[in-house]
Image: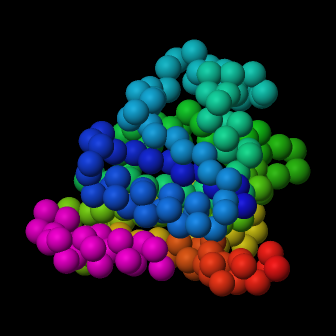
């Protein structure tokens, strides 16, 4: 298993960091190869400049400005996002990462003479996890349409491998959260990860296998 974790939060020590660490711990216990993209730590520039926009369809030259991230994306078979939901959507940093990295001939294939619509390009991605926090309640987020969740679990999911499995977990009402609600959510994240990647073998099972 090769997992790419895309993490987006400006403050280390946030609850999102605890979610990230839970995800990474599950991957480590599972024995997965892991690459972490920490967008704020890297000071990733989310702005799509005019020069990149003009070269957007110039494949494969369009990859050059974000070659490192594209290589990570092509390497992975599991893609996991950890981020806070702001104004019901993705943080600008994460949205900009999608804009600049999910390129033609990388994430999707452009329409051509035989195809009127785009086609999946991330066929190497067979599993996706989406973990977020929301200040609003579940019902209010649903009323607005949950655009952030839909962008990832529907939009990005549709350009991944056919049958790509997706697991989503959100802690709603973060502004009135409690230590108990946050602890319970980390348990929920852990269970979602177990469903996504499978549980790590028990130590007893490992000893038996070695013997």
In this picture, is 107 found above or below 20?
above
Q: Can you see residue 104?
A: no
Q: Can you see residue 36?
A: yes
In the rendered image, residue 19, in percent from the top left (x then y), is placed at: 38, 61
Q: Main secondary structure of the magenta part?
A: helix
In the rendered image, residue 40, in percent from the top left (x then y), is placed at: 38, 35
* Viewer-proximal residue among 21 and 40: 21
Residue 66 occupies which quadrant of the picture? top right
> Within the magenta stretch, is there residue 184?
yes
In this picture, is 76 found above or below 92?
below
Q: Report the magenta residues as a range.
A: 171-191
> Within the magenta stretch, is there residue 93?
no
Q: Work out which quarter of the rendered image holds the N terminus and state it.
A: bottom right
* Viewer-proximal residue among 139 and 26: 26
Asked whether, in this view, residue 185 is left or right of residue 198, the answer is left
In the rendered image, residue 51, in percent from the top left (x then y), is placed at: 57, 15
Can you name the residue that lies furthest to the left here? 176
* Viewer-proximal residue among 180 and 70: 180
* Viewer-proximal residue among 11 and 84: 11
Can you name the residue that lies furthest to the front here? 211
**Residue drawn at x 58%, y 60% as measured from the top left:** 28
**Residue drawn at x 46%, y 74% as measured from the top left:** 190
In the rendered image, residue 117, in percent from the top left (x then y), is placed at: 73, 53
**Residue drawn at x 72%, y 73% as measured from the top left:** 163
Can you name the residue that lies furthest to the top here? 51
Can you name the residue that lies furthest to the right here? 114
Q: Work out which quarter of the rendered image holds the C terminus and state it.
A: bottom right
Asked whether, in this view, residue 69 is left or right of residue 90, the answer is right
Colouring method of the image: rainbow
Asked whether, in this view, residue 172 is left or right of residue 161, the answer is left
Asked whether, in this view, residue 157 is left or right of residue 81, the answer is right
Residue 149 occupies which quadrant of the picture? bottom left
């Amino acid at each position: 298993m090769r997992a790419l974790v895309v993490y987006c939060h400006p403050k280390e020590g946030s609850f999102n960091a605890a979610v990230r660490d839970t995800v990474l711990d599950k991957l480590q216990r599972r024995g997965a190869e892991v690459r972490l993209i920490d967008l704020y730590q890297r000071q990733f520039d989310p702005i799509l400049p005019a020069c990149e926009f003009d070269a957007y369809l110039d494949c494969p030259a369009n990859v050059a400005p974000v070659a490192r991230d594209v290589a990570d994306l092509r390497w992975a078979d599991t893609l996991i996002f950890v981020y806070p939901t702001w104004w019901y959507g993705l943080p600008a940093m994460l949205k900009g990462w999608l804009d600049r990295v999910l390129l033609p001939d990388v994430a999707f294939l452009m329409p051509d003479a035989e195809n009127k619509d785009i086609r999946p390009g991330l066929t190497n991605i067979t599993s996706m996890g989406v973990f977020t926090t929301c200040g609003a309640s579940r019902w209010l987020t649903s009323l607005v349409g949950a655009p952030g969740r839909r962008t990832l679990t529907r939009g990005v999911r549709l350009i991944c491998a056919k049958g790509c499995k997706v697991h989503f977990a959100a802690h709603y009402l973060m502004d009135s959260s409690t230590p108990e609600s946050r602890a319970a959510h980390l348990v929920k994240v852990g269970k979602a990860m177990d469903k996504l990647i499978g549980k790590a073998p028990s130590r007893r099972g490992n000893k038996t296998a070695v013997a």
